[in-house]
Image (tube, rainbow, N blue to C red):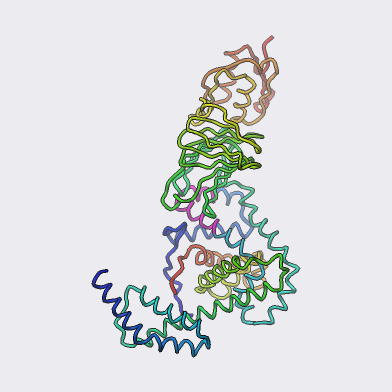
Amino acid sequence: MSSTDATVHRRTETLYAEHHSWLAGWLRHRLGGEDVAADLAHDTFLRVLTAREAPTLLEPRAFLATIARRLLANHYRRESIERAYLETLATLPEAQCPSPEDRKMVLETLCAIDRALDTLPAKAREAFLLSQLEGMKYDDIAARLGVTTRTVGNYMVRAVQVCFFAQEQPT
Amino acid sequence: MSRQAAAVAMYAGGMPLAPRVAEEASRWYVLFMSGIATDEDKRAWRDWCQADPDHERAWAHLARADARMRDLAGKPAYEALSMDRRQKGRRRVLFAAAFMAGCIGPALWAADRNRWLRLSPDYATGVGERVDITLADGSKITLNTDTAIDVRFESGQRIVRLRRGEILVVTGHAAAYAAMPFRVATPLGSVQALGTRFSARLDADSVRVALFEGAVRIMPDQDAGAGLVLDAGQTARQTAAQVTATGPVAASDTAWLRGEIAADNMPLSQFLAELSRYRPGVISCEEGAGQLRISGLFPLADTDRVLAALGRMLPVQISRRTSYWVRVSAVQ
C-alpha cells in the first residue's frame, strides 16, 4: 500500500466511524426498513472507498447523502422494475414463466438496460423497447410515437450504441 | 436525472472500441432490423465487416447482445422497462392480460428478425473462388469454391458454421478469446479445435476432416459420445451417426489451397466430380470413361484447359453442347 493509499484509507475509516450511524439512520428514515438501509449505507461507504480521489471533506454528511441519494434512486427504480416484471409474469401461464434463478438474471439485465437507456430522450427509449422487447416493426413504432419511420431509425441507432456498446458507468 | 450523454466509452468483446465503429455497426444493425436492407446493402455490409478486424469484433459483439435481447424479449420485460406503463401503476396488470393473445408474436418475430442472418451467410464464395478471411480472435479461414460459413462468437464459444463447401481453419489465439472453445459446426456434427490447423469439407452425407497440426475432437450430431480425437497428419470421415478414421492426409487435402486438384491414381469419374466443384454447370461422364485412372496436379484457374488436357492424356472425347454442359466419353 502506498502512502497515498494509506492516507485515503485512514480518511475513509474516520469518515465511517464518525458518520456511519448517522447515514444508516438517514436511510432508514427514507426507506422505513432496517435491512435495506444497512445495505445501502454499506454500499455508500464502498463507493467512497473505491473512489480513487477520496477527498478531504468539508461537508462529509452532504457528500455521503449525495451518494446515498443516487443509490436510493437506483434502489427504487430496481424495485419498480421488479414489481412490474413480476406482476406481468403473474398474468402468464406457468409454463411460460422462467425459473427463480432465471428471473434473477433477467432482472439484473433489465436493470442494466434501464440504466443504459437513461441518457436517451423518452421517445428514443420507448422506440428501442418496443422494437427489441415487443418485436414491433419500425413503421408501427413510428405510428405509435407520432414520429416518422426515419426518426425511429435514428432513435434506434442511438439506443443500440448506448445499450449495446457503452460501458456501464458506476453509479 | 441529470446525467450527461457525452463521451461515453464504447466497448466490444471486452476491449475498447472506437465510437465511430460502434456507430457504424449500430447503423448496419438498425438497417437490417428495419427490413428494408437490399442485396446491395448486404454486400456493402459484408465488405464493411471484412475491412477491419474491429468492424468484425463490433459486429460479433452486436450479435451477442442481440441474442441476449432475444432471450429476454417478451411482455414482462417490456412492461418492466416502459416508462409509460410503469407510471400507470397497478392498472397495467389488467391491460397485460389483454396482450396475452399476442404471446405467440415474439417467437414469430424472432424468426423473422433472424432471417437475414440465416439466409445470407456471413461469408461465401462463388464457384471457382477462393477467399482468405481473418476473424476477430486472429483465426484465419480459407474458403474453397462454392462455400458458405457463418461466424458466431457468443455464449462463451467461437462457432464457425459450415453451411456448404470446404474450409481450412488456422485457429487464432487473441487473448480476449483464448478461453472460448472453437468449433466448426456442420449439419452432421461438429469439430472442436484444440489449438490447431485443419480442414473440413461438407459433402452431401459426410464431412471429411483433415488435420495438419494440433488436435481436434470430431463429434457426430446423433451420437456425441462416439466422438473421435484425431492426431496430426490424419483424416477422418464423419456422418451424422459416426466417425471413421480414413488414414493419413492426402495430397488432395491441401492442393486446393494452392489452386490445384491433386489426383493420385484417381478414377476419372471422381476427378470430374472434383473439377465440377470449381466450374459452373454440369460435367457428365460416361460409365466406361469413368473407370479410367488419372494422376497429376491440375490448375483450377482455367478448368477449360484441364478438360482439354484430359483429351490429350486419356482416350476420351470431350463434347460440349454449351459451356455449361460438358460430356466426357470413351473414344471407341
Residue A151 visible in this rendered orientation of the protein = no
* Coordinates of residue A58 in the picture (x, y in percent): 31, 87
Q: Among all residues in the image, which is located at the extreme left? A: A3
Magenta segment's dominant SS is helix
**Residue B97 vs residue B123: left or right?**
right
Front residue (pair B148, B154): B154
Q: Residue at x 46, y 49 (%)?
A: B136
B104 shown above or below A51:
above
Q: x and y percent of residue B256 in the render? A: 52, 30
Where residue B37 sits, quadrant-wise, is bottom right
Closest to the observer: B104 or B179? B179
In the orientation shown, which residue stands out farthest toward the top?
A: B332
**Residue A161 in magenta?**
no
- Foreground pick, B18 / A71: A71
State the count of labels.
0
Q: Was residue B60 drawn as part of the magenta stretch in this picture?
A: yes
Q: Residue at x 44, y 63 (%)?
A: B10
Q: Is residue B24 left or right of residue B74?
A: left
Q: Is residue B312 above or below residue B56?
A: above
The residue under the point 61% across, 30% down is B277
Evaluate whether residue B245 shows in this view: yes
Of residue B306 and residue A84, the one placed in the foreground of this image is: A84
On the image, the x and y values in percent for residue B329 come to: 68, 16
The part of the image, by quadrant, that contains residue A109 is bottom right
Residue B332 x, y percent position in the rendering: 69, 9
**In the image, is A66 to the left or to the right of B243?**
left
Write the start and end of the magenta stretch as one range. Answer: B45-64
Dividing the picture into quadrants, the one containing residue A7 is: bottom left
Residue, x 57% and y 72% (percent of image)? A125
